Structure formats: C-alpha cells, structure tokens
Amino acid sequence: MPVTKTAKRALRGSLKKAGVNNAFRKSFEISLRIAKKEKSQKAVVKAGSLADKAVKRGLIHKNKASRIKSMLSKLTPTVSTKKSKKSAKK
C-alpha cells in the first residue's frame, strides 16, 4: 500500500483510469463479436473505429488494430463504383 500522500493520490487516479480502460476494452471486444456475427457494414465500421480508438488510448498495438481492421473488411462484400474505361468510351 502507498505510504505518502502523493502515492495515495496516484493510486486513486490509476484505479480510475484502469476502470475506464477495462470498460472500453470490454465494449471493444463486444463490438468485435457483434461485427463477426452480423457481418453488417454498420457493425464493421463501428468495430474498426473502436480499434483505432484503442490504439490511441494505448490498449492495443497499432499492428494488431491493422490486423483486426483487415479481418473485418473481409467480412462485408465490397461494392465497386468505378467504371471501366471501355464502357466510358462507348
């Protein structure tokens, strides 16, 4: 246990931050599970956004977030909006 006044204050702050981080981590993991299950565009975008926020907070490494976002992007079918050059010339 902390002895000095500043150490006690630091312990209180770190416990609060740990609680916030754990709550965010839990919501992130739940959104990943939902995105994998539903495979909807909205759920995938939300999970990708939370992955970026987790990196910003220092909860996960940026390469792990990149892997997660790559995996999520494979869940939804991509819609191509580009026209080919041959059809544009006709």
Image: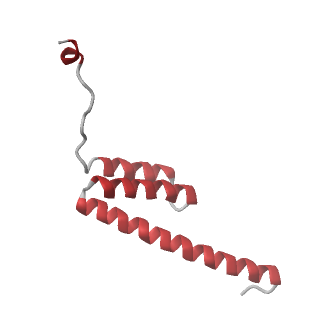
Query: Left of 8 or right of it: where is 18?
Result: left
Q: Residue at x 42, y 65 (%)?
A: 28
Residue 60, horizontal then vertical, whole percent: 50, 59
Q: Is residue 42 above or below residue 78?
A: below
Q: Where is residue 86, by image quadrant?
A: top left
Q: Residue at x 68, y 76 (%)?
A: 13
Q: Residue at x 30, y 65 (%)?
A: 34
Q: Quadrant of the C terminus?
A: top left
Residue 20, horizontal then vertical, whole percent: 55, 73
Q: Residue at x 23, y 21 (%)?
A: 84
Q: Is residue 37 above or below residue 77?
A: below
Residue furthest top as drawn? 89
Q: Where is residue 18, by image quadrant?
A: bottom right
**What sort of colour scheme is used for the picture?**
secondary structure
Q: Where is residue 35, by image quadrant?
A: bottom left
- Say which of 21 and 67 sits in front: 21
- Say which of 82 and 2 sits in front: 82
Residue 36, horizontal then vertical, whole percent: 27, 60
Q: Is residue 81 above or below residue 40?
A: above
Total residue callouts: 0
Residue 43, horizontal then vertical, whole percent: 32, 58
Q: Quadrant of the N terminus?
A: bottom right
